[in-house]
Amino acid sequence: MDELIKILEDLKPGIDFKNDTRLISDGKLTSLDIMQLLMEIRDTFDVVISPLDIIPENFESVIKIYTLIEKLQNDD
Amino acid sequence: MSSTQLIVLALFATVIFGIYNIVPVKHRSVVLLLASYGAVFAISKFLICFLLITTLTVWVSAYYINRFNSYFEIKKVSLNKDAKKSLKAEYNKKKKAIMLTCLFVNLLILLSLKYINFFGGMINKASVIMGNDSILPVFKVVLPLGISYYTLQAIGYLVDVYRGKYKAVSLYKVALFIGFFPQLLEGPIGTYDELGESLSEGHVFDKNNVLYGLELALWGFIKKIVIADRINIIVAPVFSNYQEYSGIIILGAVILFTFQLYAEFSGIIEMVTGISRMYGIKLAKNFDQPFFAKTVSEFWRRWHISLGTWFKNYVFYPISTSNWFSKLNKRIRGKVGKLLELFVPLFVSLLPVWLLTGLWHGASWKYVVYGLYYFVVMMIGVLIKPIENKLFKISDDNMPKWFRIFAIIRTFILVNIGMLIFRAENVTGFFAMFGKIFTSGSLNIITTANVEGIIDIKDFVLLIAGIVILIILDAVKENKVNCGDIGTIIVKKNIYLQIALCVFMALVLIVFGAYGNGYLPVDPIYGGF
């Protein structure tokens, strides 16, 4: 989880990622940010997120993103 | 399709609404399908065959793709990990072949009908440059109603079934989803999981839906016929004879066009959404106070939302999650500077999106430039954002009011340049008009004397009042004060007040509508796409 927070903080400094639960709804993570995040997740967690999983609900908070990563790791 | 035809279509929708509510609930969707095909046939005649081809090919393809999905789900239970992987790969290959064939057929139809003269013109130009005559004739092509909208919607359904997002559905449901007539005007482009089932279910009469829908549709009509068509009185002559006007008038016309397009496009969408709501059907949101956007990227998340979402889901993300994209990024990581590490993936994933977005709007170089303009502006925006944040010590969580206002104004200016490309006759016209804004009398102020030369002063006052109302309503929604569409802004509890308001809006439409003698008939701009 800390690794993921570090990635997000490097990507978008100044956002309270630990507590924010409306990252997509409030436009703090845009599709361009998601694109960069996907690359980082692929490199760090060795997980490929498919377009099917790229839905707002999966990216609203750090917990949601981490849950998705774990789910995909277990699927493999 | 002119405003008069738009009114005829709205009356048609009202008659169908009556029939819809008489027929037993379980057969109500049949009324929608027959009405949809009736409307398409009345407007496009035999070109309806293209809608039928798209419906049939997409239905058959999705059906077979779905069979492979089901086979895999059944067989995987008894397989080990490796066998599962190899079976999945085998089925994916077959599924991909079916999907690509279907995409090829449908994109070929779209390309042949919409872009034949554009590509033919390029071939002819190349031939002339090489000293030969033009090879290809110029075809007089009439587009089937809504082809750009229903093709994208159909492709979205097919790709979603391929991805396993949902299961394939019957031919009847596919036909209704692709052919639902209100959406064929100007969208919004829906997804099957959000819209499909709602279309094929029969809906019972609901007073709240009817009143809400009626209020929204009437407000949409007012935006189109009272505001947008009135703005056109100034915009049309200035854009067609810009050589005769001073820089300040051209600048004024560009800004007015931005509001014209907004009032018209969002107006027609509200009309379509309102009519659909009367039937009990909810359509996707297409606008979200776009002029309050702080960046151009944000503007496109608030303007024509369903098109942006389509390109994001079916072009941008497939590129960004592909293996070759990942390999490309791995190859450059650590070998180039931080800026290039960011620049290359953005360039590779955004360029196709914006080229296609430009070309979707029309088959000409002007629209290619339009798409590329937004591509360049967005690239610059993403690249300078970290510098800007550092310089002004700001972040998304900490943005002072002055910076928000500055960012909104900056975005509005950039969007207006985009609108000038969009509305100008061609690329040369854009550069000429853009240059004239800065060189020809741009320091003059707009006076009643020079406005009176183009528009009657009463019309001018009305259009300004219309724009002010538009901005105020958007500001109210943006600040989340009693949020929602016009239908929810109105007091919902009192039915008499709602009926009175509908009557009032109908009167406004009749009295102040820019139609009849002295007004130019204005075709819906996005209807032509």
Image: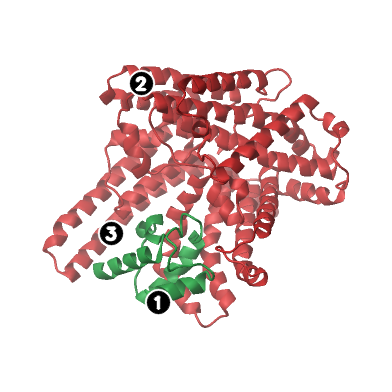
Q: Secondary structure at mark 2?
A: helix
> Taking the image as drawn, is residue B262 in sight?
yes
Badge 2 amino acid: Tyr
Q: Residue at x 60, y 38 (%)?
A: B473
Q: Is residue B105 above or below residue B27?
A: below
Q: Nearer the viewer, residue B491 or B156?
A: B491
Q: Secondary structure at mark 3?
A: helix
User: Which chain's residue wears label 1?
Assistant: A
Tag in front: 1 or 2: 1
CA–CA distance in space, label 1 to label 3? 33 Å
Point out which mark residue B20 bears: 2
Q: Nearer the viewer, residue B470 or B18?
A: B470
Q: Are marks 1 and 3 in contact (CB under 8 Å)?
A: no
Rendered shade, chain B? red
Say few, some or many: other residues with alpha carbon within 10 Å of mark 2 (under 14 / 14 to 19 / 20 or more): many
CA–CA distance in space, label 1 to label 2? 56 Å
User: Do circles 1 and 2 both sit on a common chain?
Assistant: no
Q: Secondary structure at mark 1?
A: helix
Q: Which residue is mark 1?
A: A3
CA–CA distance in space, label 2 to label 3? 42 Å
Q: Are marks 1 and 2 in contact (CB under 8 Å)?
A: no
Say few, some or many: other residues with alpha carbon within 10 Å of mark 3 (under 14 / 14 to 19 / 20 or more): some
Badge 3 amino acid: Asn
Badge 1 amino acid: Glu
Q: Position of residue B430 (x, y in %)?
A: 73, 48
Q: Position of residue B56 (x, y in %)?
A: 33, 38
Q: Which residue is mark 3?
A: B92
Q: Is residue B194 left or right of residue B253?
A: left
Shown in green, the chain is: A
